[in-house]
Image: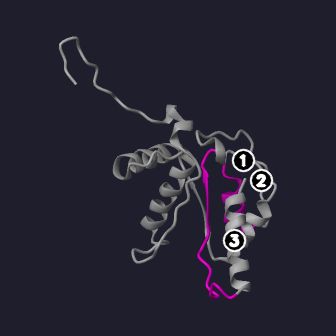
Amino acid sequence: GGVGIIGIYKAFKELQEMGWVNERMPRLVAVQSTGCAPIIKAWEEGQTASEFWHNAKTLAFGITVPKALGDFLVLEAIYKTNGCAVSVTDEKIIQAENMLASREGAFVCPEGAATLSAALKLAKTGWISSNENVVLLNTGSGLKYPETVKIEPKILTVDDHL
């Protein structure tokens, strides 16, 4: 429900107050599935709170939050850091999950894969430039969602050898 972005924003504000971080904060990005995107809708409309998202549906269970209790804090973090909010399709989430597994050997949860999908989308639009450093957060293992991985293992016959 946005606790990650809320906590990151709070931590950076505290680091600034202690003088450990300069004035410029990293731009924070909220990522949701197109099947449940109340924060994205609120951000696009310039609102400070979201509305309940009816019929929420996405394979990324952890970001299926029709109305976050701290939505106003998530939106504040986005606005104050000149960040943005991005929605991605379940199809793009699965593609990102497979990309991370095949290229990096990381079996991430769909919620974590959504961050890669969003970063790719933002890079394509130019919101993220090629010289920027980007941090993507993954908070869970893909083992929690085995149904999202589509593999076609070779079926061995009696005469086959490993």
Of residues 143 and 67, the one drawn nearer to the viewer in this rendering: 143
Q: Mark 1 and 2 residues: CB-CB less than 8 Å, in contact?
A: yes
Write down the region rendered in magenta: 19-47
User: Looking at the image, which residue is at 34% across and 51% down?
Assistant: 103
Circle 3 — which element? helix
**Label 1: how many residues lie within 10 Å, few (<14), some (14-19) or many (20+)?**
many
Q: Quadrant of residue 44?
A: bottom right
91 shown above or below 122: above
Give the left or right position of residue 79, taking residue 161 as reference.
right
The residue under label 1 is 65
The residue under label 2 is 68
Q: CA distance from mark 3 to mark 2?
A: 16 Å
Q: Name the spot of residue 133 as percent of width and height, x first.
A: 46, 73
Circle 2 — which element? loop
**The residue positioned farthest toward the right in the image shown:** 69
129 part of magenta stretch = no
**Label 3: how many residues lie within 10 Å, few (<14), some (14-19) or many (20+)?**
many
**Label 2: how many residues lie within 10 Å, few (<14), some (14-19) or many (20+)?**
many
Q: Name the spot of residue 147 as percent of width and height, x first.
A: 51, 31
Q: CA distance from mark 1 to mark 2?
A: 6 Å
Circle 1 — which element? loop
The earlier-in-sequence mark between 3 and 2 is 3
Q: Amino acid at mark 1?
A: Val
The earlier-in-sequence mark between 3 and 1 is 3
Q: Amino acid at mark 3?
A: Tyr
- Label number found at residue 9: 3
Of residues 81 and 122, the one drawn nearer to the viewer in this rendering: 81
User: Looking at the image, which residue is at 41% across and 50% down?
Assistant: 100
